[in-house]
Image: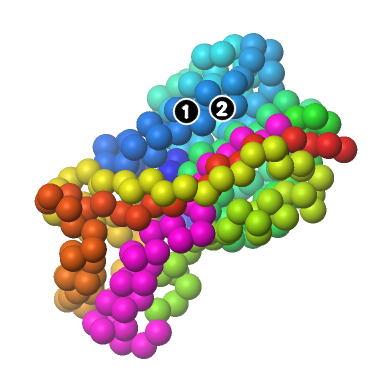
Amino acid sequence: MSMASGHMDGATSQGLWNPVRYERDFSFVWQYGKDLVALLAPKAGERILDIGCGTGQLTAEIAKSGASVIGIDRSAEMIGRARNNYPELRFEIAGAAQFSSAEPFDAVFSNAALHWMKNAAEVVSAMARALRSGGRLVAEFGGKGNVESFVRECAAAWSETVGGAPGPELNPWYFPSVSEYAGLLEEHGLEVRYAALFDRPTPLEGGVEALRGFVNMFLPGPLEVISTETRNAFLHRLEERLRPQRLMNGRWVLDYRRMRVVAVKTA
């Protein structure tokens, strides 16, 4: 999706990060992230932190350079899968805001994870602390307007079928503008060298059933508190509302907008 290669800082794992389903149905997350690794340009001997590493595919790509890389994720299930996938690499269960290391890193990398972390200032502060002076941050995540039609129609379908205003669990993401996020980085001693917001329409795997798979994967919390009948009505109504906008040649295509940033620690 990264929605996540990485995962919400503080997320519970009640089916949220199902690693088998994630690898099967959402492989585009790390496939899109491969050119971000090229932008990182890891070098042999560097220490690199991969925040929101998911099941470890991009951590392994970074390690191919000879860099010493640590992958962290808040999801124990995802870290378990990553360790199984790449037993030779180091993975830790940790939230980005809470992670600390006695030895600084040459680079912090993150793909499709930071938009799950609404405590953005704390996360940026932790990333800045993790870097040595002159170290770099290379990250991509959902930016302003990401899945805007999904968020809008999700709220409308919820009101029409469940009733009442939807809670924040139905929109658990942080999608900042370029100026907002660049300002946050600069406040914490990170000089922005590159920042861009761009459209990336993203098809979901699985045909007409894929939208339900997306909702079940990334928004399980709200669905757990309603009856099966109401849940099905909500999903059906969501599909009806989104179909004219997002169903294209039998595939759901979500209106992804990605932010990509490169920053350097100046202090």
Q: Quadrant of residue 219?
A: bottom left
Specify the amino acid type for callout 1.
Answer: Asp
Disc 2: CA contacts within 10 A as few (<14), some (14-19) or many (>=20): few
Residue at the image point whose x is 65% and y is 26% from the top: 48
The reply to whether callout 1 and callout 2 are in contact (CB within 8 Å) is: yes
Q: Is residue 211 left or right of residue 61?
A: left
Q: Which label sits on residue 142? A: none
Mark 2, residue position: 39
Observer-nearest residue: 86 or 24?
Answer: 24
Pointer 1: what residue? 35
| Left or right: residue 88 compared with residue 178 | left
Given residues 29 and 50, the one toward you in this image is: 29
Which contiguous range is marked in magenta?
136-165
Quick check: can you spot residue 67? Answer: yes
User: Could you say whether the residue bearing mark 2 is in a helix, strand or loop?
Assistant: helix
Q: Amino acid at mark 2?
A: Leu
Going 45% across and 33% down the picture, which residue do you hit? 33
**Above-or-below relation of 266 to 62:** below
